[in-house]
Amino acid sequence: MPTYPDLPLPEDGKLAENLAHFARALRKAGLPVGPGRTLDAIRAVEAAGFARRDDFFHTLQAVFVSRPEERATFAQVFRLFWRDPRYMEHMMSLMLPQVRGVAEERAAQAAEKRAAEALLDGQLPPMPETGEAPEQIEIDASATMSAEERLKTLDFEQMSAAEIAEARRMLARLSLPVRPLVTRRSRATPAGRRIDPHRTLREALRRGGEIARLPRKAPVTRWPNLVVLCDISGSMSDYSRMVLHFVHAVANRKGQGWARVHAFTFGTRLTNITRHLRARDVDAALRAAGAEAQDWSGGTRIGQSLHAFNRDWSRRVLGQGAVVLLITDGLDRDDAGLLAREIERLHLSCRRLIWLNPLLRWTGFAPKAAGIRAMLPHVDSFRAGHSIASLEALGQAVSDPGDSGEKARLLALLRE
């Protein structure tokens, strides 16, 4: 929990105005802050006072933060906004182009970047003058991509607040088409390829044994269910939020094929959020889902969560050829034997099991973790799930029974 020194706040009668500006900065940084919360913050500060900086911080955090993953962004905006003597210098250092290692680009850096963008209103500060002629860099425009194409391939974890907002709008337009399932039942139709012998005999009996025509039939088709199991642990929080935006769009788009869409989240326990995704407003739906799931950004117990799903929900939602999307990085603390048994049972209960893993974004990814090694043999398709482009490619994995993604290559690495 961050601590702050006891610095005197201004007594110029503009605290309410400053709180309104602070709320606007939080909204630009991605927090769902509206006028109602701003008024609540003013009343809370009036009631709690602001003699100590820590009390002021926790009072505002209690009003403006409603989900665990919002705490880091709130702390950064608070530190930069409320009288940090070097906040402008820190914001400029955040907004200047930098080359960072892959391991450093985690949630803390993303929160700092969004806070700096919110307070600087998305504008880069001017580069310092050094008196030297700037280096001329030639760029081949023919090799550049449009902003939308670049955003499609950008990692969810590396997106700024503005890029996340645009990515959510793009995810709302995505679809996940699926082919209908051919059942054993049939229906009468003149265009059927097969002769219906029962109807033929019944009509012949009415005519004294004379066969006047040959009735035909065709198989009945129906749409399968889609079941989504989404990991919301700390290492998956940035990806799970974006994937759930996509799942909400699929669940609320009529006429694209799925009979029903069931969604579950898991970290340390399993939570059914299907009813929350039926809300038309995606922000309201995910806010309700976040309130229902109390283990956001916590630990991971994949084996125990799959055991709970197989025991309590498998027979209810996996009947009649359901397709299961499992979104997790596979980094599990449970017993690998338990995880292997439960993922095998899940695989045998559904028509197709597709695993989306954001770790596949790394070129040199290898199945070294015990959880990944236990799960990999029991999935039908193993694909990346870190960007809009990877979610667009899901249509091929769902519709093509022969699509295995990266499974074959990684199984070969396991055998070596």
Image (cartoon, grey):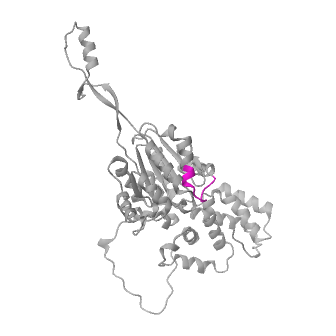
Residue 52: quadrant of the picture: bottom right
Residue at x 55% of width, y 42% of height: 311
Split into 4 quadrants, where in the image is the C terminus? bottom left
Residue 288 visible in the current orientation: yes
In x, y percent, where is residue 132? 44, 92
In this view, the residue farthest toward the bottom is: 131
Q: Is residue 165 left or right of residue 175?
A: right
Q: Of 222 and 148, which appears nearest the observer?
A: 222
Q: Of 385 and 279, which appears nearest the observer?
A: 385
Split into 4 quadrants, where in the image is the N terminus? bottom right
Give the dominant element type of the magenta stretch: helix, strand or loop.
Answer: loop
Is residue 198 placed above or below 265 in the rendered structure? above
Residue 329 visible in the current orientation: no
Magenta stretch: includes residue 304 = yes
Region rendered in magenta: 294-305
Q: Of 247 and 401, which appears nearest the observer?
A: 401
Q: Of 190 and 356, which appears nearest the observer?
A: 356
Numbered-mark total: 0
